[in-house]
Amino acid sequence: MGPDGAPSQSVPWRKVLWERQPFPDNYVDQRFLEELRRNEGIRQYRYWAVVKEAGFVGQQLSCVAIFITLWLYMEQGLLAPETLFWTSLTCALLGYGLYQALTSQTESCSDHRTHLADSQSAVLFLSFTFGFSPVLKTLTESVSTDTVYAMSALMLLAHLVSFPYAHPSPPGSLSLNAALFASVCLASRLPGALHTFAMLTCALLVFALWPCLLQRIRANAPGQFTGVCVGVCVGGVGGLGSQSLGGAVLLSLALVSVTLICPLLLVRLQRHKDNIHGPWDEAEIHEDLSRFLH
């Protein structure tokens, strides 16, 4: 008897399907495992490199905390809407200048937008937001406050889950829409229409413009990227701590888990990864078949 219970034959076994052979259908010879390959093309991670990339997740979590902190200050009357609006506008102008300064010559040639077009878009957004602020203020009057808070929390969670951390410029439509929906819900619970306008302007800055600038910093100024992420995380914990000590502790634990513990687990578990490849893999067609598509 041959291997795997196959009868001894003078004709050797061949790995073909179009030829009848005196072997069982599931028969394989001793050469079957000679082509076994383990962990082919596996990527090796370095701990601090993973921590640096995880910093983007941590700072986005802190951005949500900063936005909630500003909303709490507005709701309690500790922050005037005029102050928030002019501060947001100043930060937006400074960020736009930094964005342009970090733009390389190649990126500048590929981007056909002009400063005038950017200014027109900003003025258009501010005009429409200011005009519709009284409507947005009364948008959720018929909805209970608990329902509004629950919807806002759910949408902010959807924003964090669906955010395109690998390529956040521009932010994904799902994550951005979820964040703006939550912003509208929270802004509608503020005292006046001007508060709503200032809060929505801040939301656009935090959830739409800031990720684009941070991505440009990560690409063209990687040395400063880590420091910026740490600064945002510290600001998020400090701001939330001024309103809720328990919230600041929970945010700190979440940041430590996301930026330090999860990368450590990834690097530690990577050594136990065992992917096998061999003749049992599905066939891959490497030939260019585009000529058949015409």
Image (cartoon, rainbow, N blue to C red):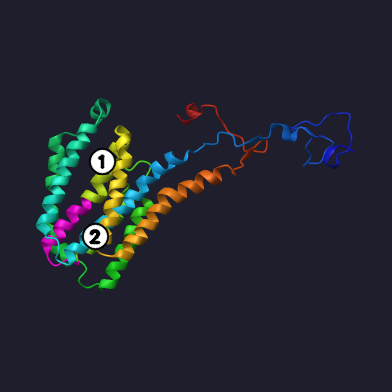
**10 Å crowding of disc 2: few (<14), some (14-19), many (20+):** many
Disc nearer the start of the sequence (2/1) = 2
Residue at 37% x, 48% y is 57
Secondary structure of the residue carrying numbered label 1: helix
Q: Tell which of 49 and 212 is nearer to you.
A: 49
Instruction: Indicate the quadrant containing the N terminus: top left, top right, bottom left or bottom right.
Output: top right
Instruction: State which region is magenta.
Output: 189-204
Looking at the image, how many numbered discs can be counted on the residues? 2
Is residue 97 located in the magenta-colored stretch of the structure? no
Q: Secondary structure at mark 2?
A: helix
Residue 13 shown left or right of residue 239 in the figure = right
Name above or below for residue 85 compared with residue 98.
below
| Residue assigned mark 1 | 213
The question of residue 195 being in magenta is answered with yes
Q: In front here: 79 or 35?
A: 79
When the figure is inspected, residue 65 is found, relative to residue 53, above or below; the finding is below
The quadrant the C terminus occupies is: top left
For residue 174, side relative to residue 15 (left or right): left
Q: Position of residue 66 (x, y in %)?
A: 25, 55
Q: Position of residue 26 (x, y in %)?
A: 77, 42
